Amino acid sequence: MQRAWKGKFRRFGGIDPNTRMMIAVVQVDENREAGAQPQGPRLNRGLYVEVELRGPPRADCMAVPRAAYHDGTLYVVGAEDKLELRKVEATLVQEEYVCVTGEVQAGDKIVLTDLVPALAGMLLAPRVDDEGTAALQRAARGEAS
């Protein structure tokens, strides 16, 4: 049986050294599900629960797929379909995407394929991934896939 409560994130409480789970402190004002009978389960302190954190979209986030971020470098399709290596800094790292700043701007074509070796100036045969673009936009907005 699944129960849901609304709460507010208050702070991170560190990482449990035994389970490697992150501890999050979430304040729940109503610890019984709305409309639940008194015999329903209570949400007590110390229970292991799954928490979904949501917040407003970050207007300053230039999101790129996480797989496209290579330790401070993005592979970009440049002039004449040649590879450019652009220096960027990750400002936020999420499961599916990374917010970056630096030598990249909206509209740049990001290479998603892992190039080995990735040599500046190498000729590319780019293809647009409309499905991947739509999935990235949904993830960056915090929408379910």
Image (spheres, grey):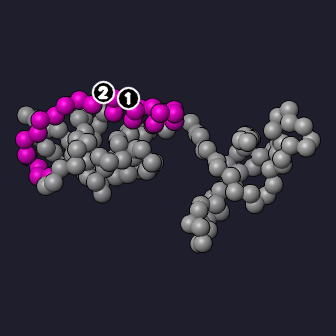
User: In the image, 79: left or right of 56?
Assistant: left
Residue that appears at 30% across and 27% down: 130
Residue 10 at least partly seen: no
**Closest to the observer: 39 or 103?**
39
Crowdedness of circle 2 by 10 Å Cα count: few (<14), some, many (20+)? few
Indicate the amino acid at tag 2. Answer: Asp
Can you identify the residue that label 2 sits on? 130
Residue that appears at 77% across and 46% down: 28
Read off the magenta span: 118-145
Q: Secondary structure at mark 1?
A: helix
**Residue 20, horizontal then vertical, whole percent:** 56, 66
Residue 54 at least partly seen: yes
**Residue 128, horizontal then vertical, whole percent:** 23, 29
Is 129 part of what is drawn in magenta?
A: yes
**Residue 33, horizontal then vertical, whole percent:** 81, 38
Q: Secondary structure at mark 2?
A: helix
Q: Is the Cβ of the residue at disc 2 closer than 8 Å to that at disc 1?
A: yes
Residue that appears at 8% across and 46% down: 121
Residue 14 picture quarter: bottom right
Assign the N terminus to one quadrant of the image: top right
Q: CA distance from mark 2 to mark 1?
A: 6 Å
Can you identify the residue that label 1 sits on? 134
User: In the image, 76: left or right of 1?
Assistant: left
Is 135 part of what is drawn in magenta?
A: yes
